[in-house]
Every structure is written in structure tokens, then in C-alpha cells.
Image (cartoon, helix red, strand yellow):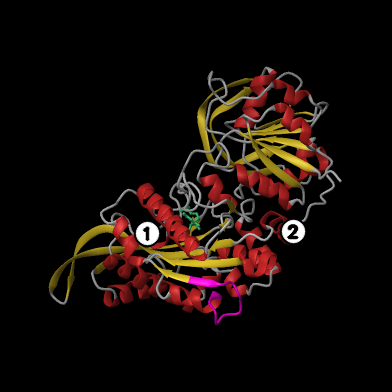
Amino acid sequence: MKRETVVVLDFGGQYNQLIARRVRECNVYCEIYSYKTDIEKIKEIQPKGIIFTGGPNSCYEPDSPTYPKEILELGIPVLGICYGAQLMMHLLGGTVEKAPVREYGKIEVNVDTNSKLFTDVSPKTICWMSHNDYISKAAPDFRISAWTNDCPVAAMENTDKNLYAIQFHPEVLHTQEGTKMLSNFVYNVCGCAGDWKMDSFVEESIKAIREKVGDGKVLCALSGGVDSSVAAVLLSKAVGNQLTCVFVDHGLLRKNEGDEVEAVFGPNGPYDLNFIRVNAQERFYGKLAGVTEPEKKRKIIGEEFIRVFEEEAKKIGAVDFLVQGTIYPDVVESGVGGESTVIKSHHNVGGLPDYVDFKEIIEPLRNLFKDEVRRAGLELGIPDYLVFRQPFPGPGLGIRIIGDITAEKVKMVQDADAIWREEIAKAGWDKKVNQYFAALTNMKSVGVMGDERTYDYAIALRAVTTTDFMTAESAEIPWEVIGRTTSRIVNEVKHVNRVLYDCTGKPPATIEFE
Ligand code: XMP
């Protein structure tokens, strides 16, 4: 049976994966293709609908990403978003030019609720805008269906041809009724039935992994984080004893974390994963000595990881497959999945060395978002407390210590972080924020303690709320919790004399510091 599919054509925007995810939330299967994909390939898929994404370019510049106009003549409904909307107008004879007023942020948009796209949407609705260019004139035969004070053509449609274009971003949660608009597109315009469900993911994956692996040996990189834990348990269900899990303690873990991971996944825990712990702290510190550039640190940690695995694999002998817990946001932010600009090379993805000594890498969660991974984890019977752990990045504290890394700095950030987590949990804020940690700034400043001058480091505390980790807001933690934490940190952690709270959201900052 042919699976009903919506295709997202990627023109390089940062939120492209979110579009796919929102479509999947409507129970419609969705795949992302680069704008460089041949139109014949898209035709073969027979998509129920096509979505053009946003992107950083100006569509009227000669070398900007474009697509053959024929895509708009196939009779398949197309929705253009932001750059995608501008490109659609540009291809069909509308006018796109530099906007006299750049719109950025949450903007009130007037919509015509008679449009199929805006059925059941409020006539005035808050949408997320982020654009330098604007559509000054829609293409012939297009009707304007939304507008703002500064943007006379915020949405337009040609219902005879099923072509829709919107200047704002329905995929980000800041657009309050964005999910409704995308659901309207896939159901009202494309006529999808919505028969794709996440439940089948685990079952399908286990089957596919078994087929691929045969009787080969599999090595899994287990960090104890949600992603690699779900990947490991999934693999163990699929291939049982053929799996060995290697846990590398790179000396950049949170306080006591190594022992905690061993307690759950080691020989005395509830799982049987052939667990091997490698204590490689000195090795990582040696490689990182004196390195300050964030991308370089990420690459070194990523590469060293792979080397450690290769060595373990050689000890086991004839390892065919390496499993990694890479998830969708890792792929998009590393710029390897689509056309987006590289923000950070995520550990295990962009940081992968050119030469890897395994037959193949298996990444069973590569197409899932964090909350989808958690759902898969629950289906696999992994306990809640593991499934809902806050995320911890692969390069660990290495990217929470600004500047060069030393064992002494690691200890400082571990101790400060442990205090922050303890105080947050005591105050019940661990349920209200999605990620919280301490980072060591590379800043030293003057203080006074017991009549003595000090010249010591500043710790930055971070706590954010987010649903997708692509955008986030700094959490308003009560002052007394921050105050108590501050006083404990300066008293209990040597060489720290100042504590700062990070009030920045993402964008413009990122969640981690490097
Ligand atoms: P940023 O800092 O990019 O982080 O806003 C978004 C989310 O991703 C986590 N993160 C990582 N996770 N490997 C990972 O597995 C990495 O290299 C990495 N870098 C960031 C980060 O903790 C946050 O949850």
C-alpha cells in the first residue's frame, strides 16, 4: 500500500525540520528533500502536498535557491512559507523586494477566515515573522488572504490551482494558531486521511534493524542520556546478545554521573546490554589541553569518542555496526540534513571523522524529535525517570566551560551544577523548566571574602523552558532559589566568587554556551 506523504522542499531555513514534525503531528507522514532534488524524484513519490520552506536568501538574486516552475503545475497542492512564499510569487510573476520595514518577532496578522487555510483561525492572530524581503505584489490570479500593517500581502492563494503562500512561520510555536493552519493545509487542501501513527515506529524499526544486522555484531555508544538509552534498548530488543554497549567516561560528565549510568545499564542493573565502561578522562583532557575554540573542542571530543569506540570494537573483534543516538535536531543544526547554515557541529554528526572503522553506522532515531524519542522510550518500557531526563549534550561539560578545559575547571562546574540542580529540584522547579545547568564563564573578577581580595571565576546559571529545543525562553526562577544557590556556590565551590543568571532566550543565544 502506498503511504500518504507530504514532501517538504528545503530552501535552507532554520525551522525546516519543525515543519516536518508539525505535519507528522497531524498523523501524516512527511519527508524533507533538498531544493536540489530532481523533480522526477518528487513526482515518483506522488506526494499529497508539497511545502516550500523558508530560507536566508533573496529570491530575486541570481544565485539564490530556486526550483523548476513545473512543480507548481503538477496539480499537487503547494504551500510556500516565508522564502518559499516569495519564491512561489517570483516564479509566477509577483513582485518581491527589500521590505521598507523589516518584520521580526510576534506580529498580529489579520486573516480571512473564509480561506481553507484559515478555517477556525481567529480573524486577528499572533504569528511569527522573520523577513527582510516582502511580497509587494501577489502573482496574477492570487487572492490576498492575510495582511499586517507593514506587510500588505502576508498570505495569498490561488484556490483553482491549490497554491498557497504565507509570509510568516506557522511551524514555530510563537505562531499561536500555526498548527491549525498546517493541519488545515494537509486535511482541507491536500485531502490527507492522517493514517500515519508513531506507535508503529518501534515495531517497524525492530524489524528493519534485524534485517539489516543479520547475525552481525553491534556496538552501541551509550551515554546514559535519553537518546542513546532509547537507541540501546531498541537495539537490544532487536538483536539481543549481539549488542555490546560502550560507555565512555570522558571526564566531562556531571557530578557522579558515571556511577549513576553504570548502576542503571551495568551488570547489576535491570538491562542486559553487555555494558563496558571506559574511563578515558586523562586522554580527553590531554587532547583538549589549551584548546579554546568551541567548534574545535566539539570536533576533538567527537573524534576521540570514535577512536575509543574503535579500540573497544577491536577488542571485541569483528564489529560490523556502530549505533548512535543521533536525533533530528542534531542533524539539522549540524547542517548535514538539509540546506541550513551550520550553527554548531553536533557531537556524533558534524564531528564525525572522515574515516570510521565500521561497516556501517545505525542511527535508529535520526528522524525523530526529542518528544517522539521519549514516546518511543515509553513504548519500549524504559522507566519514566530515564525517559524524561533533561538533555545533556554529547560533548558534555566541554561546551559548558568557556575557553580551555582543565581538570580543576571541570570540578568547579560539576560542583556548581550539582548545587543548582539540587536547589532547583528542592524548589519543585525541575518539573517547570526543560533544561537547567551551570556553566563556567572564562571571566575572572575581583571579589572580597573574609576581608581578603579574591580574583576568581564567575559561574553562569541557566534554566530554560522550551518544547522543541530549537527555540527557548529563559525561565523566571524565583529570586530566593537563585539567591540560595549563589550563596552555596560561592561558599562551597573553590575559586568561584561570582554567580550570574543568563536571561537570554534562543534566539538570539543558544541553550548551551558553545
Ligand atoms: P543549543 O545549544 O544548540 O542546544 O541551543 C539545543 C539542545 O541540544 C543540546 N545539545 C547537544 N546535544 N550533542 C547533543 O547530543 C551536542 O553536541 C549538543 N549540543 C547541544 C543542548 O543541550 C540543548 O538541549
Magenta span includes 271: yes
Residue 406 seen in the figure: yes
Q: Local crowd at mark 1 within 10 Å, few (<14), some, or many (≥20)?
A: many
> Which residue range is magenta in the image?
265-276
Mark 1 is on which residue type? Answer: Gly
At horizontal 52% and vertical 41% (from top left) the residue drawn is 335
Pick the residue in front: 352 or 167. Answer: 352
Which residue sits furthest bottom? 268
Q: Nearer the viewer, mark 2 or mark 1?
A: 2
**SS of the residue under disc 1:** helix
Query: Which residue is label 2 attached to?
Result: 207
Lower sequence index among marks 2 and 1: 2
- What residue sits 68% from the left and 49% below the top? 22
The circle drawn on residue 398 is: 1
Q: Position of residue 219 (x, y in %)?
A: 56, 62
* Label 2 residue SS: helix
Q: Is residue 225 magenta?
A: no
At label 2, which amino acid type do we have?
Lys
Does residue 498 appear to the left or right of 186 in the view shown?
A: left
